[in-house]
Amino acid sequence: MSVADCWESVRMGNPEPDDDGHHPVRARLLAPDEWRLARDARQAALRDSPGAFLPWRPPESSWTEDRWRESWRTGLWAVAEAGTRTAGLARLSMDGVDAYVESVWTDPGFRRQGVASTLVRRLIEGKRPARRGAVYVWVIMPNAAAFSLYESLGFVPTKVTQPLDGQDRVEEQLRFSGDRSRW
């Protein structure tokens, strides 16, 4: 399945705006031509939650248009949108046969509404079938909310941890079990 085959939106809730004019949140995979949307959402995530990501300056802050487009050769980006507002972003990077969920972020106005779980599900569904390897995620500890999110989606702890460079923090690896029964 190509990225183009995965563009159909996954709708959360009622597709019509509610009585207050709020739009439903829709999650979809992005195409390389939408690199600006990925860049802007990633920069918003880094401004909003710098402690939730790796503690040093991420390379995305200096990426050129060509580098952003290149990121689609090594993975997928998904965005959640409510009308014209970006509600969340996530990436699935490919490393050999395995894939890694990363850069998961939900705008503060949309937290606890299922945005992150929908983004992760969309990425796993969009994973290229030729890649039969495992799907992993690294969670910077302590982060009970992230751990709970991934466990609710079928990720299981691998008991593999690694220290963050020069930090007093570690991250723990979880692997997607393939169990989609809770989706």
Image (cartoon, rainbow, N blue to C red):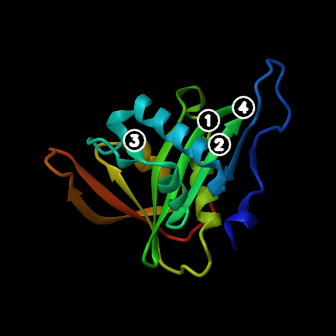
Of the numbered discs 2 and 1, the one sitting upstream in the chain is: 2
Residue 30 visible to the viewer: no
- The residue pinned by badge 1 equals 87
Q: Nearer the viewer, mark 1 or mark 3?
A: 3
Percent position of residue 65, x then y: 52, 49
Of the numbered discs 3 and 4, the one sitting upstream in the chain is: 3
Q: Tell me the element at label 2.
A: strand
| CA separation in Å, label 3 and label 4 | 23 Å
| CA separation in Å, label 1 and label 3 | 20 Å
- The residue pinned by badge 2 equals 80
Q: Tell me the element at label 1.
A: strand
| CA separation in Å, label 2 and label 4 | 10 Å
Quadrant holding the C terminus:
bottom right
- The residue pinned by badge 4 equals 84
Percent position of residue 68, x then y: 51, 53
- The residue pinned by badge 3 equals 61
